[in-house]
Amino acid sequence: MANRLARLLLVLAATGMLAGAPSFAQTRDSTARQPAGATTADPGAGDSAVPPTCSDGSTPSISRNEPPCGQDEIGPDLPAGVVFLPDILLDLFGGFAREPGQPGGERLSGGVADDGSPIPRDRSAPDDAGAGNGTGPAASAAGAARVGAASLAPTVSPRAIDGAYVPDEVLATVEPGTAIAIAAAFGLDVRSQRQSELLGATIVLFGIPDGRPVGLVLAQLEGDPRTRARVPNHIYDLQQAAGVANYAFERIALDFGSASGADVAVAVIDTAVDAAHPALQGVVAASFDAMPDIPVEERNHGTAITGLIAGVGNMHGMAPGAAIFHARAFDSGKSSMDVILLALDWAAEQQARIVNMSFVGPRNRLLEIACSAARARDMVLVAAAGNNGPDAPYSYPAAFDGVIAVTATDEKDRLMPQANRGPYIYVSAPGVDVVAPVGGGTDLVSGTSFAAAVVSGAIANLLHTHPDRSADWIEAALAAASRDLGAQGRDADFGHGLLNYEAMANAR
């Protein structure tokens, strides 16, 4: 209220200044504010022009206390000394802001996928608790405030957004019980809301029903103290580059015969898996579908990651016996931030010691907070460094502090050409043409996704024999025990070097 009063005083002061100085009177385009049926002066007729009239034939009033053409008309060009408030002053009042699509309020384009195409969504919004009966403060706010989002906040500049994102959604953490009121105030829909274990707040997926750009909505929400963090619903991609004894065991100095991850809980956030595959029999301790409304179309990537970590039988994983907590969060190689956060929360609730994240995307503040909270719980976070080439930007979550970023090497310890580079690369592991289970059998697979799975399996072996090792200890031991590759010391290609399990397990 104080801010609105201050703006009112500013406008009144400006109005007085303008009215007191006729030389500052605004000349308006005759079509800009002319009501239907009004008559205008001929611009070329000079003093003999027809005097201005309103739609009912009356002469426009020049009184300061009433509209020039009555309550419902703004009026045509008026005689000297009659002044309209400039738009910049009108816009100080939320109620006078232009609606999207009206003159001066053109809509900007929304977010798109990497290929330039829009990313459609078809979700229905669940009811807020207590909102279904049409009573209470939330319902009152919803009924009173939905006058159009542009009328409820001052004009703001859209925020620049990196990476692909869902073009009609934003995510925000909010004060409990405020989701519906916030949605009503900004012309949004509540598509989902829940209490996040890792974020320690209510996370809400807001839909944008009127085509406003995501950057504009985020900027508008920043002015509402009921919101804590506001981010795009970013899109993330699985990291598979191409494609029988697995050479990975030899290259990382892990004994095939003694490898075991028994009693170690490993969360895998990936596609669905082929639960009937012989290599996965008895491997998955619990499953969670973070995207139940999307039909399952892909299982190979998740099956390969799970098999490389804990496969059994003829497809011996790096840590057989590990308990896999599998969260389906991807299909057709894609997922979004809201789904990934849901899967991460579930992994934390299962008390997973290791979380394998073989996917990449842009930096996202909520993902960063969630990863930091998971690490604070002593969860070891392992992520693919990315397969987008040496000039690609940093990939996340791998580039977050506290996340072990894994790049891929081949059987001769050469870097995979498609691998990302950068100072965030932490360690290297076999990830080129490694054998892994897929639907219907096995295949050679390549990518930093699979190198990450090798590292997750190696860490599961370590925690099997040393369950008291902390995430900090494991990260330090990885760095100290890795076999240096490339330039001396840690570098942007190989990180600290190739994982050496034997040296890591013997570290003190």
Image (spheres, rainbow, N blue to C red):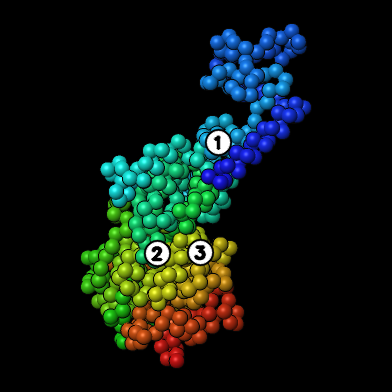
**Real-space Cα separation, disc 2 to disc 1, in angstroms:** 36 Å
Q: Amino acid at mark 1?
A: Ala
Front residue of this view, candidates 343 and 126 = 126
* Residue 151 location (% of width, % of height): 51, 37
Q: Which residue is mark 1?
A: 97
**Real-space Cα separation, disc 3 to disc 1, in angstroms:** 39 Å
Check the picture and name the quadrant holding the C terminus. Answer: bottom left
Residue drawn at 51 percent across, 44 percent down: 213
Residue drawn at 44 percent across, 82 percent down: 474
Front residue of this view, candidates 265 and 247 = 265
Near mark 1 (Cα within 10 A), the count class, few <14, some 14-19 or many ≥20, is many
Front residue of this view, candidates 422 and 313 = 422
Please report whichever mark, 2 or 1, sits nearer to the chain's N-terminal start: 1
Residue drawn at 56 percent across, 50 percent down: 159
**Residue 98 occupies quadrant:** top right
Q: Is residue 472 visible?
A: yes
Front residue of this view, candidates 483 and 291 = 291
Q: Is residue 22 left or right of residue 4?
A: right
Q: Residue farthest to the front? A: 65
Q: Which residue is mark 3?
A: 395
**Real-space Cα separation, disc 2 to disc 3, in angstroms:** 25 Å
Q: Amino acid at mark 3?
A: Ser
* Residue 184 location (% of width, % of height): 41, 43
Please report whichever mark, 3 or 1, sits nearer to the chain's N-terminal start: 1
Kindly state the secondary structure of the residue where label 2 is placed.
loop
Q: Which residue is mark 2?
A: 200
Foreground tag (2 vs 3): 2
